[in-house]
Amino acid sequence: MEARTPRSASRSTTCSVPGLVLGFSKLCKITKVCAAPDFADTKTEFGDYCGGYDQSLVLTRLFEEIRSLKSAYIKLQKAHIPYNPPKIAFADEIITSELDSVSALQSLCSWNGSVGSLINDRWSLVQELEAETRKKDSDILLLRRELDGLKSENSRLNKQIKSKPSVNKRGKDYSTVLKQLTTPSAILELFKVASTSVHEFAELFFSLMPSSDHCSNSAEEQSSFKRYSLEAYLSRTMLAHGGAEDDDEVDAARFDRIMRCCDPLDALMEHSNSSFARFCRSKYLAAVSPEMESAMFRNLDARAFVSRGGHPRTWFYRAFATTARSAWAMQVAVAARRRCSGHGNVRVFYARRGSTYREEYMESVVGAASASAAGIGVAFTVTPGMKVGETMVPCRVFLHYRRDQQDAITDLSDLKFR
């Protein structure tokens, strides 16, 4: 067998196999998006033949050799895993043979340069497109960094806005919002709103409670007694001090945003760690006992959810949150007045059971005609009264026939909002 020239000597001037395969692979890819050369035009430019051979046949033969070269190179890679010297030697001989065939085709057309010129043109186009792609990638990267910088700056500004005293659109400091609520008329107006809200929630609450069969003089009187008893219970629970915070941590801007929300549940979701959220949770657990919730809904799911710190998005809890927000706003205003004036100056009072009805301190829930009848006294206070300075809102009372002539008003000055 004739000795073969060493590979290092015979291909010292040619490119490596990976480089050649990569070059022709890029050439094949670029021809998919570029117009294929017309052999009629090529014959005019470079002549009809390459070394006496038809140019179309030469190109077809060239691409066949390239495919064979790729296949041989894949076999050479597979022979390394696992390592098999005989297979490596065999694949090496195939690659050498294919390279010789490619070199022969190159020599065949080297005098005219048609194939070489076509490859160079296509390769130049590939490089231009790659350069343009790299430039666009660089622009995208710069724009992405700029976008990240803008997001970071926006986040910093939002934190800065929340940490500083907020100012409304007309330039008025939010601190004046609470100061305006410390006037006697404003506090009493908030108290009326809270009392009305408790009354409406009590009506809803009573409609959900199952009816019982207690004996009484009449069904209507018994129903009225139960309804106002429930309202009295809710008034004492919701309007009594002990849930709203009265320290300096009450943020005026947050107070304004909470009160402006149309849906109180949205305010609870947005300000989940606020004093309003804590007030709402504590008052729900106090106002709606497990027995009441079980009687209304046959389960304690809402109570369990609130106990874990959540706020269920149910229609009943939305109604309760509406009432709780009005009561919370009233207590925040009272706390703000105490800080501004330096003393409480706000008193809540109840009518003692059995006391005579007095119009200057009381308002009957059953009408003035019934209140003026002889022998009528106070059964219990439905809604407490409030006195701020010299201005007062009378308490609402439920009347009945009294057994004695005790006549007193209990002025619970120790029940100041602290």
Image (tube, rainbow, N blue to C red):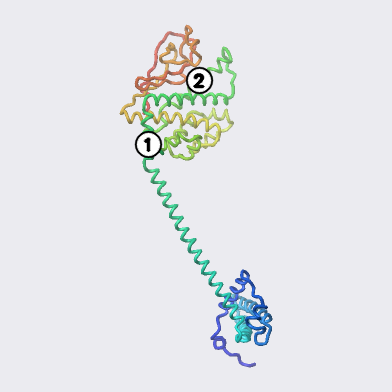
Quarter occupied by the N terminus: bottom right
Dot 2 falls on a residue whose secondary structure is helix
Residue at the top extreme of this rendering: 374
Residue furthest to the bottom in view is 2
Would you call the spot at circle 1 few (<14 residues within 10 Å), some (14-19), or many (20 or more)? few
Residue at the image point whose x is 62% and y is 72% from the top: 31
Q: In the rendered structure, which amino acid carries the disc numbered 2?
A: Ser
| Whether residue 108 can be seen here | yes
Name the one closer to the observer, 211 or 251.
251
In the rendered image, the vertical position of residue 31 relative to residue 15, given as above or below: above
Q: Position of residue 79 (x, y in %)?
A: 61, 77
* Image x and y of residue 220, in percent: 57, 15
Question: Which residue does the image show at 58% across and 13% down from the upper left?
Answer: 218
> Where in the figure is residue 350, as x and y percent of width and height?
42, 19
Image quadrant in which you'd find residue 92 = bottom right
Q: Is residue 205 left or right of residue 409?
A: right
**The label number, if any, that marks residue 229 in the structure image:** 2
Q: How many marks?
A: 2
Q: Secondary structure at mark 1?
A: loop
- Say which amino acid is labelled 1: Lys
Residue 63 lies left or right of residue 130; in this view the side is right
Q: Residue at x 32, y 30 (%)?
A: 340
Please give the residue where the numbered disc 1 appears in the rendered image.
172
Q: In the rendered view, does 294 fall on the left or right side of 58?
A: left
